[in-house]
């Protein structure tokens, strides 16, 4: 679901191009094959799924249900429904290129939705959908990738690749299981609720597991999200469809 860039050398920045070192490209190519191959990944640039899960906010465990639709590179629509202290929360988020719709209600009453920082985070979440597609990472005009030292996390050895998304001037790090070559974890600077419930900058890790092949593409069906090393959210995906396209009207944003 969610959910990439630093400054390039001046000449490359002026040209709008990035770099891919050989080791990073090799790691990404192995991951592309592990996830189903370039043909399948490039064919299914859209998806739709339902979800159940729980999140921890100001010491409360909140169970939720939701649904997500997306089309890479820059469109997604998310709806979350939950009960908080007996009240019904509904969150709707739509990203359509640079346009954002972000609304939260409690028992039908509109709540503050986060402002410009939240909108930037939502645009970045759309970009992360494309990063997860993997094949676009080899496009040096849009991404710069660099191999990092191998890592061992939770007893598993990983290859690590830093990804810089040139359009967003943010970066993330992808961790690939050295045995399966699957993209098991993505880490980046994100936004999350503080102990008082107010949004703050956090180090976010999204761990994928329970991998399943859908239309020949291997995707995680369970996602664990940690903030500052502590469990923040767990998502169980179901009714997952990979699609070639979704009608653009689904992502329309009313003025």
Image (cartoon, rainbow, N blue to C red):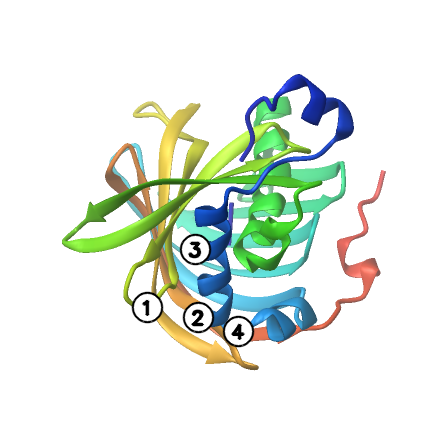
Judged from the image, the secondary structure of the residue bearing numbered disc 2 is: helix
The image position of residue 143, as x and y in percent, is 62, 41
- The span from disc 4 to disc 2 (Cα, nearest Å) is 19 Å
Q: Nearer the viewer, residue 173 or 243?
A: 173
Q: Which residue is mark 1?
A: 180
Q: Residues within 10 Å of mark 2 (few under 14, many from 20)?
A: some
Q: Which mark sits nearer the N-terminus, 3 or 1?
A: 3
Q: Which mark sits nearer the N-terminus, 3 or 2?
A: 3
The image position of residue 212, as x and y in percent, is 41, 76
- The span from disc 3 to disc 1 (Cα, nearest Å) is 11 Å
- The span from disc 1 to disc 2 (Cα, nearest Å) is 7 Å
Is residue 151 shown left or right of residue 245? left
Q: Which mark sits nearer the N-terminus, 4 or 2?
A: 2
Q: Which residue is mark 3?
A: 27
Is residue 150 shown left or right of residue 26? left
**Residue farthest toward the top in the current orientation of the protein:** 10
Q: Is residue 236 above or below residue 171?
A: below
Q: Which mark sits nearer the N-terminus, 1 or 2?
A: 2
């Amino acid at each position: 679901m969610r959910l990439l860039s630093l400054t390039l050398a001046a000449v490359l920045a002026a040209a709008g191009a990035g770099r891919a070192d050989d080791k990073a490209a090799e790691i990404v190519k192995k991951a592309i094959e592990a996830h189903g191959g370039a043909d399948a990944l490039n064919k299914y640039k859209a998806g739709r799924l339902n979800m159940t899960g729980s999140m921890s906010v100001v010491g409360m465990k909140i169970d939720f249900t939701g649904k997500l639709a997306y089309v890479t590179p820059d469109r997604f629509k998310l709806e979350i429904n939950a009960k908080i202290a007996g009240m019904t929360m509904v969150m709707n988020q739509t990203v359509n290129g640079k346009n954002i719709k972000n609304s939260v209600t409690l028992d039908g009453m509109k709540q503050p939705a986060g402002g410009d920082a939240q909108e930037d985070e939502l645009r970045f979440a759309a970009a992360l959908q494309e990063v997860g597609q993997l094949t676009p990472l080899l496009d040096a005009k849009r991404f710069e990738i660099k191999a990092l030292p191998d890592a061992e996390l939770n007893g598993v050895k990983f290859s690590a690749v830093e990804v810089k998304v040139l359009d967003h001037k943010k970066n993330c790090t992808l961790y690939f299981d050295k045995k399966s070559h699957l993209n098991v974890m993505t880490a980046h600077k994100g936004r999350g609720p503080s102990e008082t419930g107010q949004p703050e900058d956090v180090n976010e890790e999204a761990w994928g597991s329970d991998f399943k092949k859908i239309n020949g593409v291997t995707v995680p069906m369970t996602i664990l999200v940690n903030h500052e090393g502590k469990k923040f959210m767990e998502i169980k995906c179901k009714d997952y469809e990979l699609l070639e396209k979704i009608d653009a009207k689904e992502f329309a944003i009313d003025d």
